[in-house]
Each structure stands twice: as structure tokens, then as C-alpha cells.
Amino acid sequence: MTEGRIVKPLAVFIVVVVVLLGGIVLLALADPGSSGPPDGQSIDGQSPPQYQPGAVDMASDPEDGKIQIDTDVGEKRILIDTGHDNQLSKPSLEPMTEAVFDSGHTIEYGSLEVSDAEDSLGQYDGILIIQPLTSYSPDERDALQEYTESGGRVAVLAEPSQARVSSGPEQTSTTVSFGADTLTQRYGVRVGAEQLYNIDDDSNDNNFKSIYASPSDGGELTTGVETITLDTAGYAAITADTDAETTFTAAAGTRTLDTRRTGTYPIVVRNDNMVFVADSTFITRSEVYDADNEVFVSNLIEFLLNGDASD
């Protein structure tokens, strides 16, 4: 008797399950599209467009091009200053130095070697100064000013003050500052106190600190350039009564990192035979092929090669 009471409800349960499964199959056959979207397809209300597979990879600037030195001025010499705790790496500058050698010119690393008795700068047509951390002596400043007034050309690449954290078990933080303001102020320009940033995706290179800048005039430094990108950009503070002129300006919406001030920020400034750039990353191997950086570097090197302080 007990066995019959158990078997009968079990049979009813099996019949119900079979009927339900049969109904689901019939519904699927009647509406094939109701079986759900294939993997990766959007489901309304659950998968916003920004999370779709096609939106995962962010657009980035092409990293191609070539540093092309086009100047018919005979064999010229450039000095890269290393005498002021300059923050540079020779391997990172190889794309630029190789282009100079390939075009038949010479590029050297060394100190300025200026003394009261003899000025050796005249043997160079251009001098490149990259992020010096120690200051230039009065004699060095006088010699460089005389050098540019005599036809030699100088390019100074600067970065704003930044905190540097030491490695090791006891980490310490120190402030690293540009050391040549007393030099560049003779040309009516100094580096601004803050780094810049821009949160507009159309005004940065996939990083809010990697800002864009564009030409402000049509001079030789801007030929063929639409946009340059700078990873540690500051800005050039220009003295009111000076002949210094802005050549590149940061993209609209650019702000200072600490005080969040929006403004029109000069990035590249020229005063006759001196060019000041408020960034030193654009010339390195990792950044030189971003946007039109390689074209700007080509123009900057040609600017230096066209100097002549031999007289």
C-alpha cells in the first residue's frame, strides 16, 4: 500500500516536467531569435556601449615617421651639455643623434669648458641643454649669451619642479628643479612653477599628463607640424618686455596640476638664436615618434645646425 502512494505522485511529477520541457522547446522553435544574443553582443540595459569589445582598445597616436635632417650647410657640430647634472640618457637620445650623424654632421657630449682666458664654444654651431639641475655660473651665462649674439644657437629643454622618491627600504622624497632659470631669464623666459594636464581625450595622448600642443606661428620650427605631445610639460613664463615669441601653445582646456588654473600656456618660445621648450621627454626614444614629435625634433636640430658662431 505504501509503495502505491509513492509511485503515483512520482509519475505525476515526471509528466509535469516533460510537459514543461516540451513547452520550452516549442517556444524556441516558434521564435528562434529568443534564445539570446551571441557572446559579446549588447543586451539592452545590461551592457552599455562603452563596455562592448570594440570599445575596449583606446585610440592612440601612431608611432612612426622618421627624423629627417634637411639642411645644406656643410658639416656642422652640435654639443649636448653634460656638465650641469643634466637629466638625460644617451641611449634614449639615439634616434636623434643617429639622424644627425646620418646627415653628415657631428654631435658630441661634454661640458661647456668656459674660462676667462678662452671661450671654446665657437667650435660648435649649436648647443643642446637638456634639463640641467645645477645652475650656470656667471661666466657660463656670459659666454652663452655672447655665443648666441655671435650667431651660435642654443636650445634649452626644461621641466617644472617635481618630487622624486628615492628607492630602498627608507624612501625619501626630494624636489627636483630646473637649474638654468638664471640663464634663460637673459632671453626673457623661465620655466613655470607647475606641470600641466588636460583631461579632454582629444587634447591628450591617452594620459591626462601627456598633453598636446600646436603651432602658434609659421616659423621654421613649426614646418610640417600639426601636433606635438609632451609627457612632463610645464609652461614658459615670458617676461613682459622681451623679444621672446611663443612658437607652440598647449591645447585648449589645459590646466596647471596643483592650482587647477586654466589658461593659454606657451610651451615653445624662441628669442632670436635661443629656443626654450618646457618639456624634455619629446626628444627621447619612447616619445619621439608620437604625433608629429619627430618632425618637430627634425626642425629643432636643423635650427641648431644653421647656427654659426665661428666668427
Image: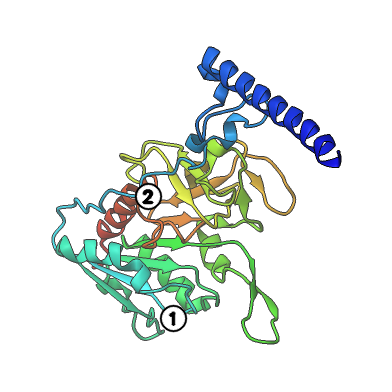
Q: Residue at x 51, y 49 (%)?
A: 267
Q: Quadrant of the C terminus?
A: bottom left
Residue 48 left/right relative to 292: right
Residue 308 left/right relative to 45: left
Callout 1: helix, strand or loop?
loop
Residue 275 in the image: above or below residue 177? above
Q: Quadrant of the N terminus?
A: top right
Q: Report, in whole angstroms, how far the alpha carbon at label 2 lies from the one at label 1.
A: 26 Å
Q: Residue at x 40, y 84 (%)?
A: 115
Callout 2: helix, strand or loop?
helix
Looking at the picture, how far across and down is residue 118, in whole percent? 34, 83
Looking at the picture, how far across and down is residue 70, in whole percent? 19, 50
Please name the colour scheme applied to the rendered image: rainbow
Q: Is residue 293 visible?
A: yes
Residue 83's disc number: 1
Amino acid residing under circle 2:
Asn
Looking at the picture, how far across and down is residue 218, in whole percent? 37, 36
Q: Earlier in the sequence, mark 2 or mark 1?
A: 1
Residue 208 in the image: above or below residue 13? below
- Which of discs 2 and 1 lies nearer the camera? The answer is 2
- Name the residue tied to disc 2: 293
Residue 24's disc number: none
Q: Residue at x 57, y 65 (%)?
A: 181
Q: Is residue 311 visible?
A: no
Q: Residues within 10 Å of mark 1 (few under 14, many from 20)?
A: some
Amino acid residing under circle 1:
Gly
- Quadrant hosting residue 8: top right
Q: Residues within 10 Å of mark 2 (few under 14, many from 20)?
A: many
Nearest the eye: 265 or 77:
265
